[in-house]
Image: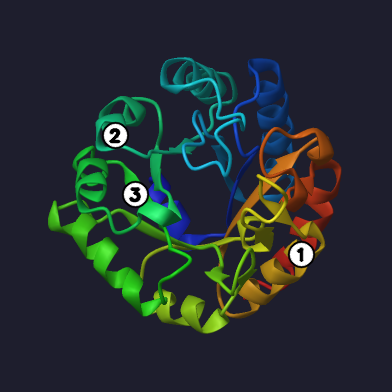
Amino acid sequence: MNLYQELKKGPFLISGPCVIENEAMIMDLAEQLKRMTEELGITYIFKASFDKANRTSVDAYRGPGLEEGLKILQKVKETFDLPVTTDIHESSQAKPVAEVADILQIPAFLCRQTDLLLEAANTGKIVNIKKAQFLSGNDMVYPAKKVEYTGNQQVMLTERGKSFGNNDLVVDFRDIIDMQSFGYPLVMDVTHSCQKPGGAQGKSGGNREYAPYFAKAAAAVGVKGFFFETHRNPSEALSDGPNMVPLDELKGVLEEVLKHIS
């Protein structure tokens, strides 16, 4: 069974820190997350960003960059025999990232960028399209069809919340039900859905305490893929700390979520 078939079957987890802070931190998290998911019996994909190109402030930490970031992700892949994913923000990044990543992630803000979608699709890798904060679930059929236009049928869709006024998001579970009707593997990005974008004086805030509830609610409507950002010390994370689930709490959360998967 190839990776895409595993994702269609589920359950699966995409998890890691928001951004690559350093190699030691990444290797530690990958080791712990692999052990955790093996114990739970679920498919696992490691995720971390080499560049956070859409940070709120120009002064915010963005990551190690393409070259160094891919070296670290390659080390994770080889050391722990794990599939990996990361996001791309420019069409030119698709080909080099595809040499390492098993799944190319399209950021929510960029999910309608035709050239970015086509370049990602042309790599032949799985393309995970995150739903924009301003789109309905039904609207996501169009980005998916752009990928399929190239002949690449390996599409995933991810729910990550919808804009709800200023600096806030809400999850409309009708969007999840609508996206499921397309037949692609569907992911609930639990922790990004807890964000308060740009709501913490030059950076994003969040409410991580909602994450377990969002995950269980998504499982109850048929979702079998979950995206959790995690960190040993979220308060010290260089990106997205307020909405990350602490690593030492994640297994317990996942155990509860798995009880709700039909």
At 61% from the left and 29% from the top, the residue drawn is 61
Residue 124 vs 168, above or below: the answer is: above
Question: At which x and y percent is residue 90?
Answer: 31, 37
Determine the secondary structure under disc 1: helix
Query: Colour scheme of this structure image?
Result: rainbow
| Residue found farthest to the left | 150
User: Would you name the residue on which mark 2 appears?
Assistant: 94
At 71% from the left and 64% from the top, the residue drawn is 258
The kind of residue on which mark 1 rests is: Pro
Q: Is residue 16 left or right of residue 40?
A: left
The kind of residue on which mark 3 rests is: Val
Q: Residues within 10 Å of mark 1 (few under 14, many from 20)?
A: many
User: Would you name the residue on which mark 1 appears?
Assistant: 212
Dot 3 or dot 2: first in sequence order is: 2
Q: Nearer the viewer, mark 2 or mark 1?
A: 2
Q: Residues within 10 Å of mark 3 (few under 14, many from 20)?
A: many
Residue 257 vs 43, above or below: the answer is: below
Q: CA distance from mark 3 to mark 2?
A: 10 Å
Q: Residues within 10 Å of mark 2 (few under 14, many from 20)?
A: many
Q: CA distance from mark 3 to mark 1?
A: 26 Å
Residue closest to the eye, 45 or 146: 146
| Residue 257 in view (yes/no) | yes
User: Would you name the residue on which mark 3 appears?
Assistant: 127
Q: Is residue 180 left or right of residue 154?
A: right
The kind of residue on which mark 2 rests is: Ala
| Residue 124 occupies quadrant | top left
Q: Is residue 142 left or right of residue 212?
A: left
At 74% from the left and 32% from the top, the residue drawn is 32
